[in-house]
Image (tube, rainbow, N blue to C red):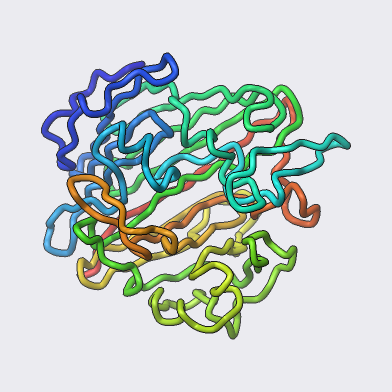
Amino acid sequence: MNNTFPTEGNLSGLSRKDFQKEINDKETDLFILKNKKGMEVAVTNYGCAILAIMVPDKNGKYANVVLGHDSIDHVVNSPEPFLSTTIGRYGNRIAKGKFTLYGEEHELTINNGPNSLHGGPTGFHARVWDADQLAENIIQFNYISADGEEGFPGNLEVEMVYRLEEEENALVIEYRATTDKATVVNLTNHGFFNLAGISNPTPTIENNIVTINANFYTPIDEVSIPTGEIAKVEGTPMDFTTPHAVGERINDKFQQLIYGAGYDHCYVLNKIETGSLDLAATCFEPNSGRTMEVYTTEAGVQLYTGNWLNGFEGAHGATFPARSAICFEAQCFPDTPNKPHFPSATLLPGDEYQQVTIYKFGVEK
């Protein structure tokens, strides 16, 4: 593990010693990424969790705009185990924890009602990755997921890079993966964002103005599994093709919002072509003036409005109540292995899984 870049004196106030621990015979640590514009991102190699994203508001004041923890023990024992981590082998839900691939049925660990969620309880979010900080603004993570881990077939070799653009405040996430056996792969980052900045209590994101470049979404049933329908957003509270405040319709008596206790749905992105890197969503926080743009090569993005956050404590005494974060999880559609008409999440030997997702921060004055 290469950690030759200084971590002291960072904007997030995190201490390296609080993140150094041996877990499952591997060392965890704190890494600080910086760009020329003054943006800082703090990460640990446990779950590749993003601990802090420090960006300025309209007055130049820096704050942490992602929900995170201030020690490795808190990350490991977080009431929200997926808090701003990398998710795999399969982000989102797989119905009843089962799927059949080339005639062979695979059973996964159940950890969300009757379903498998985010790769299971010991998915990629709960693993110590190998880390190599290549430059002040770049870190590479590697992990080998063994055949049968959480029930998934094939030895999957994953390489992921977090990179800060030098001339703009953008976090670029690049993923690659290969397998030695047919498997399913759906990697994502579960950043819990609050553009106002985390605090005690962290404010609700209901004033955030959001657009999503999607005319369709995947409706869910009562256990949050897609019904298989690709439904129009037009004429429903799911429509973010034009700017809307998150809180404007989140409590409408609309069955999909009732099922999700708010927004927790996959949007079918309007793509220029399959795999193209396109603008997926925008978010604007009026008080701070901070903005975020999400670009991805993925076919879908899960909008999640932190509906199940319960007020637990995070970094430096900040607390995270319900709806104090917004997530834009770039991904394949949920339960794709059981929905043949959804774009495939299958990865075969000899092929390479690739994804690029960018979170770009700015301000409107």
> Which quarter of the figure has residue 19?
top left
Q: Is residue 316 left or right of residue 220?
A: left
Q: Position of residue 138 (x, y in %)?
A: 34, 31
Q: Is 3 left or right of 129, judged from the image as shown? A: left
The C terminus: image quadrant? bottom left
Residue 258: image quadrant is bottom right
> Residue, x 52% and y 56% (percent of image)?
278
Q: From what the image shows, is residue 37 above or below residue 30?
A: below
Residue 135 image offset from top left, x and y in percent: 30, 26
Task: Residue 110: give x, y in percent of width and height.
Answer: 64, 43
Residue at the image point whose x is 41% and y is 61% from the top: 306
Q: Position of residue 126 (x, y in %)?
A: 47, 33
Q: In the rendered view of the protein, which quadrant contains the N terminus?
A: top left
Which is more toward the observer, 77 or 35? 77
Q: Residue at x 56, y 49 (%)?
A: 297
- Left or right of 245 on screen, residue 14: left
Nearer-the-camera pick, 219 or 299: 219
Q: Is residue 116 left or right of residue 211?
A: right
The quadrant in which residue 355 appears is top right
Q: Is residue 84 above or below residue 306?
A: above
Q: Which residue is rendered at x = 58% and y = 39% of the image?
A: 120
Numbered disc total: 0
The answer to whether residue 108 is above or below residue 334 is: above
Q: Nearer the viewer, residue 331 or 295?
A: 331
